[in-house]
Amino acid sequence: MRKRIQWLEDAVFYEIYPQSFKDTDADGIGNINGITEKLPYIKELGCNAIWLNPCFDSPFGDAGYDVADYYKVAPRYGTNEDIVRMFMEAHKLGMHVLLDLVPGHTSWRHPWFVESMKAQKNEFTDRYIWTDSIWESPEGYGSLRGISDRDGSCLVNFFTHQPALNYGFYKIDRPWQQSMDSEGAIATRNAMKDVMRFWLSKGCDGFRVDMAGSLVKNDEDGKGTIALWQDIRSFLDESFPEAVLVSEWGEPDKSIEGGFHMDFLLHFGPSHYNDLFRCEKPFFGGEGDASEFVEKYLENYAKAAGRGLICIPSGNHDMDRLARTINGDKVKIAFAFLLSMPGAPFIYYGDEIGMRYVENLTSVEGGYGRTGSRSPMQWDDSLNAGFSDADGKNLYIPVDPKADRPNVKSQKTDDTSLYSEVKKLIAIRQSHKALKNSGEIKFIRNGAEGEPLVYMRSCEEERIIVALNPAGKDQVLQTDGECSEVIYSFGGTPDFSAGKCRIKRGSAVFIKIS
Ligand code: BGC
């Protein structure tokens, strides 16, 4: 049985996209020292854990998800010493930091790949997945071809400049496909363990793992990839038992089996996450339907229950800003959901103040449509919204140009702001065990069109009903107990009488049941 990590029980994460958070050296791009400077802000909001997007040396063709040196902080962000200081300062504040590990691919500029492209056999020949002839491309995958002296096509994982690392094939049906226990595949696995050892020894608390479910190829049921992660987990259990792993996998039965503590609910694939926040009629916009989300969530919850957590993010660097499809007070109801569900919540930087998707930006660093969700953090109403002292035209992505763009400074002093609501919700979550990450959930109403979404969170000590009614009609709830306390309400307090409760339209309430 995997070690229980105490701090995960009440972890509330804040995702930092380092290039856009805080620039302390006026070069127009965020840096590690900027993050360190802002740790007290994150702490004050109530978040006690950080997921930091890739910060390693890279040509930044995919915002750092194209690593060129796993052992070195990208000079534009600072130095390894800076990040170690950041870990230490975070720990002093009782916070934990997860780095973003990209084990599936590197940049084509990575020295391993430069060696791998050579015709002469060397240590890195089998570090990546190559066919044995330039005329054969791997079926079902993109490939790099005609760029090396080596004869062969190299499989890519995402963009064409991201060659896939070789962890082997679960089923082998071509002669060039190597097994999971081939020398090359084992060497890659060990190289990734070395990377993990390096950063864990320097003080990080674990990793969010990029594309964690796709490392072993020809592995339809994920059996090979699960076995691979189990092996990595045993290495961690021996050397770094406290190390936390969060997966971008979206199949908690598999990821948790593999040794991950938590898996993300993804905005792609079968999760129906987008039905809630990002579609033509999102549930939290007041007109949508959450029922398919609930059905899918329950399936996954059953698979993960008692073994690991499913994390629901407010957004991330890959999807549209929450405030693009939901606005005004409805965002507060969405946060009442995000901060009352089981599993560790993840808040994407700036979502706590309702930062907007910046329209019509030219793609930056492989962002394409994602660029609008990656604009600089808006701290105040000074130059560049307080993000950087650089000349505005030198910012690597422009700040939201709208005059009424939200900022931290003004929202902090406004009790009715989104920031204040998010802060309040986190504090409520942290003071009620039933609402914390491992508290149970039972759905009472599934948010079918026009209906509220209602669920009970419980633990041995308490039961709390969460009722979310973003739609335009009041709703009456039958409760199987008496309300002993309204611990949170937004948009109107509910009326009670004899086991019935009227929930106002456009409101969110948390009710303690006796
Ligand atoms: C990351 C993306 C990245 C891709 C390739 C994703 O899961 O979140 O930002 O482009 O992996 O590494």
Image (cartoon, rainbow, N blue to C red):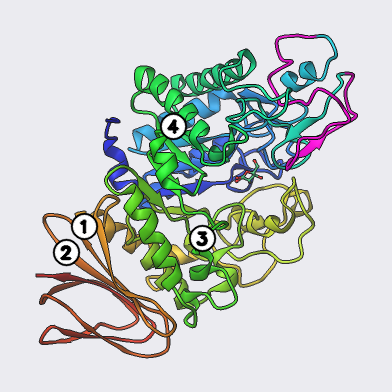
- Is residue 40 at least partly visible in the picture? no
- Whichever of callouts 3 and 1 sits on the residue coming sooner in the sequence is 3
Tell me if label 2 and label 1 are in contact, CB under 8 Å: yes
| Mark 2–mark 4 distance (CA, rounded to whole Å) | 32 Å
| Mark 1–mark 4 distance (CA, rounded to whole Å) | 26 Å
Provide the secondary structure element on which disc 4 rests: strand
Relative image position of residue 66 (x, y in whole percent):
69, 35
Q: Is residue 502 left or right of residue 259?
A: left
- Whichever of callouts 3 and 4 sits on the residue coming sooner in the sequence is 4
Query: Does the magenta segment cover residue 36?
Result: no
Nearer the observer: mark 3 or 1; the answer is 1
Quarter of the image where ligand 1 sits = top right
Mark 1 neighbour class, 10 Å CA radius: few under 14, some 14 to 19, many 20 or more: many
Q: Which residue is mark 4?
A: 206
- Is residue 161 at least partly visible in the picture? yes
Q: Which residue is mark 1?
A: 434
Dot 2 amino acid type: Arg
